Image (cartoon, coloured by chain):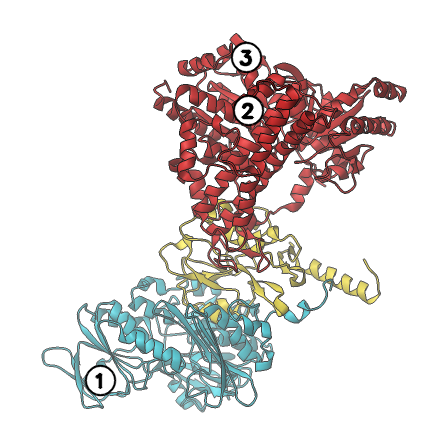
Amino acid sequence: MRYVIVGLHAAGRSACAWLRRLRPDASIVGVDPEAMPPYARPLISYVLSGELEPGQLNVEGPDFWDRLGVRVVSERATALDPDKKILTLASGRQEPYDCLLVATGSSPRPAGVQGSAAKEIHYFRTRGHVERILAACRPGGSAAVLGGGLVGFKLTMGLLARGMRVHLLVTSPQPLALNVDERVGAWAAEQLAALPNLALQTCVTAQSMEPEPSGGYRLTLDTGESLTVDLVAAGKGVIPASGWLDGSGLACADGLAVDQRLLTAAPEVYAAGDTAICRDVALGAPRINAIWPLAVEQGRFAAWNMAGQDCPYPGGLAMNSIPLFGRHVVSVGAVNPRLTRGCVSEVAEDRQGRYLKLVFDGSSGRIVGALGLDAAPRLGELTWAVRRGLTRDDIPTHWRRAPLSAAPLAARTEWLAKAAGL
Amino acid sequence: MSKTDFSDLTICKDAQQMLAKAREEGVETVWDRKRAQEPHCGFCELGLSCRNCAMGPCRIDPFGHGPQRGVCGADAHVIVARNVGRSVASGAAAHSDHGRDLVETLHAIGEGSTTDYTIRDPEKLARIAVELGIETAGKDTNALARAVSERLFEDYGIRRNSLAFIGRAPQKRRDLWKKLGITPRGIDREVVEMMHRTHMGVDNEPVNLLLHAARVALSDGWAGSLTATELSDVIFGTPTPRVAQVNLAVLKEDHVNILVHGHNPIVSEAILAATKDPGLIKAAKDKGAAGINLAGLCCTGNELLMRQGIPMAGNHLMSELAIVTGAVDLIIVDYQCIMPGLVTVAGCYHSKVITTSPKAHFSGAEHVEFSLDNARQKALQAVGMAIEAYSGRDPKRVFIPGSPVPMMTGFSNEAVIGALGGTLTPLIDAIKAGQIRGAVGIVGCNNPRVKHDFANSELAKELIKRDILVLVTGCATVSTGKQGLLMPEAASLAGPGLSAVCRALGIPPVLHVGSCVDNSRIMSLCAALATTLGVDISDLPVAAAAPEWYSEKAVAIGLYAVASGVFTVLGVTPPVLGSSVVAGLLTNGLEGVVGATFAIEPDPCKAAELIDARIRTKRLALGLSA
Amino acid sequence: MVVKSVIIRPELCVGCMQCMIRCAEAHSESGVLALAVSEAVLAKPRIHIGVGPELRPFPNKCRHCEPAPCQEACMPGAIRSDIAEGLKIVDMARCIGCGMCGMVCPYFAIRYYPAAQVAGHGAVAIKCDGCHERVARGQVPACVEACVTGALAFEDVNRHMNAGVNRLANAALGVTA
């Protein structure tokens, strides 16, 4: 059996590890143009803020792939022929496969800015990106960050930590709109507003970017205003990196649709991670949730299925843990106001400002989301509850009474009530 | 079950042999029960649990993860301080209630309502009457007994300006107590007030609570315990030096063996008298015994040992093991430190347990209630029961280990001063000359959480090596006695100065001064030394140690020693570490308040170093050699 | 080789919280309760007594899942299975306190606190490490040693299951063993 794994980050690495456990003798080929050894991409924000050294991005040693018995080909994949079961690489070299996993991840969504300098916008996804931003940073300088989502937020905090003045330009009425509810969003905006060296502007979009003769860039906004800054960085979300499959016959414009076993429309071609369109359990609809833990998990499920086990993937959901101004914000499933119309929510909070919100579907009562401020440990079981399809009635009284100290929902508490002995 | 090495539990050969016998015979002892209780409650070990009211029970999380306040809002410091306060109140209550029984006895003698007790030391009674300001002229002994007992009754109840014996404390010390507002006002009052203060919603300031705890303890050390000691001397005689014997081998295979256990001499002295009854001796012989043998356990054993030279079978942890010999026919108890497990152990043999006090019944024991007007008759009845029980003894199960160890006893203050020629001057001279560098009271109990008798005896050895005179009371007496330290020959183990003094006077380097209420003798001696030298007790080169303490009484003793200015080393950590405020005050802060603190040091060698350093400092401050 | 693990029988738990206090003690710098409570960075328990139905106590700790959601969510690879057989152990030096593991742990078994082992590091994930160091020394986990009611036991899972089957069979047959 010859497995080819295209993309060796979260999903691909997880798939390789599980395939090797399940198929000790199989031949596994890994294809990825980015320099090895493996590193954790989401950690680049910690490097930008100075909390980690660049070397700490590496999560495995240089001999990781050798120890795993994976032959690594450091090239970009350019085409797939599902009929002949052949993968073509940038060099023209071809890799035949019996079973293939597409785990090529995603790319930054272009910022949509016109102008001759727009190509100098920094994006923020890879080790190379953070290295380039760090090279461009200078204390006392100014920067514009486009996008008020998680990446934009982390860019902002990192650039501030590097001593820059930052203009954060957010298209939505408030930052982190996708990840939090109005209450936590308002709190975050308040905290941001209080930061020195930060100018937050909401409901605004950058339209064009031109070089300034004296150095730096002039950024023109849709309000007619303009800004002069030394550096422009954008975090406007990601798009699946599946364009290379255009000629394969697979529908790939918005990612690869997969079935329950993470199999694409092509035989023996699976997809996992940021390229795979899976069922979202909170929304009940297919969706890409481009996040690390789901990529690792899908890599595992893909490997199980590729190894011949029938393991239906239960579906993913949005979830994020965001260390924010010394506190932990964790959101799971549907919490942002746009997605939770018609939902019912329950809120628990205490005097320390810890806040926990459960969001239930208005008609079925199913729990579809949860949000916590400094309640991080509690969110895991709510993630589980969303995935398990628990309803409002499944949340027992004792849990409601003391949501910060109650026994976990996942504990089989019903037998507590039974007499001891069995 | 794996073979247990009993040398981990006790240093005493007799104890190790009895533990092996108990194991073989399936008898559960205090060590088994202690093991079954492990692990002990961590909250309680730190003093952080509170059961004072029904809004709780409450616990404070010492790691800051869980609750930091009880339901009422009390924090760790208040809870720990309240718990300490209640322990001290219980300990002081025990000593003082014991003292009250002696006041009642003295009063009954004076009234003529008992003929079973008499006054054996009328001279001491007269001295006490003078001390208490009672007009002695024209009063016979009974009239003095009435007057003294009435004055002492008042210590328990009615508020007076001061307690009867408080004048023994040096003036400087009394002034300090007054300044701090901790001069005790009444024995029962201070205990009751502590129970009041520790009720929910009364005293919620840890320092204020601890200051009152000090006052409660002082009402014990300078009144309750002191009364017990002084009146026991008046009624049963002031001890004088003599040689007696110790360890389980004082039991005699061919005799009816009776053990007295508990604290007050009132019952044990009556039993002693009954064992000499010719009719009962004949009855015993008729049953085939060679005679009737009486031995003591615990503090009532110390009382008989001090005054009558009755042998000691053992201390606190030996009480069950004495029964395991299979040779004990009757064990007669009054109160305090009698483990309820004793009845269960006795049930494994033919041994009978008899309770005597209306205050202390034990399930499974036979109750023969002693009162002042029937003590003699009840004692005869009890000894008769012992002879009866002797018939049921199974000779095959009898094993009395080893042979008795001699020990010297009877060093009351009067005896010490008498031996010195009627004055403290020779002692003071020896201290000044550095022959005796200082004195330390090793007091208190045994505790199964530490190796039985190890710390008590090792500390004594370490101290005498350093020319520090050791005074022992209570269970520490047996610990040191069994190691031979209570004989003049032990002078060879002492440093050159102390050794020379001991040889000159023919005394041991470790002096037995009594039972646990007799720690008051040590306080009185310290007070007399300080007054003679014109200094405070806290200026003296003295210290106290309770290396194996277990009881709430020991907490009260420790606190009255410290509040009187005596540096006190505890070998077992008290449940106070949950509060930095309480622990800090007890081990550090009190130095600036009462001139002494507690130290916690389980290692007897290190404890000796701490004490040595203290004594050196005090000697230098007095202008003496280190 | 028999691999033992901590088995919890919540119906025997009386909520005394000794497991919590002894767990924190065992994971303190000094390892001694009396000293542990005054350390500069207080150790924290890795087992918790949660409130169950009708206020009954529920002992709750990491189940050391395989595969473990926390391990999959851990970006810096701080949750390791190569330290001790069968255990998922947080390598505090690698932990960045991001909270991802708590976001996916279904059992409320991970908390975030500063730890003395990585002083100055900010809050890190604190969870049961199976007391692997104690076990290697031949001791049982601290929580099990602390439990006086038998709600926590350190046993071979299979043997424990057999005991349960026997109890069930006895109950079904009306036998009181």
Residue A299 image offset from top left, x and y in percent? 49, 75
Chain letter belonging to callout 2: B
Question: Color used for chain C?
Answer: yellow
Question: Could you tell me which secondary element the residue under label 3 belongs to?
Answer: helix
Give me the disc on residue B418. Answer: 3
**Rendering quarter of residue A159:** bottom left
Marks 1, 2: nearer the viewer: 2
Secondary structure, mark 1, is helix
Q: Residue at x 52, y 49 (%)?
A: B197
Q: Which shade of the palette goes to chain A?
A: cyan
| CA neighbours of label 2 inside 10 A, class few (<14), some (14 to 19), many (20+) | some
**Are the residues tagged 1 and 3 within 8 Å (C-beta)?**
no
Label 2 sits on residue: B134
Residue projecting furthest to the right? B286
The kind of residue tagged 2 is Ile
User: Which quarter shows the C terminus of chain A?
Assistant: bottom right
Depth check: give the residue in front, B143 or A402.
B143
Using a 10 Å C-alpha cutoff, classify the residue at mark 1 as few (fewer than 14 neighbours), some (14 to 19) or many (20 or more): many
Q: Look at chain B in the picture and name its colour.
A: red
Q: Is residue A209 above or below residue A198?
A: below
CA distance for labels 1 and 2: 109 Å
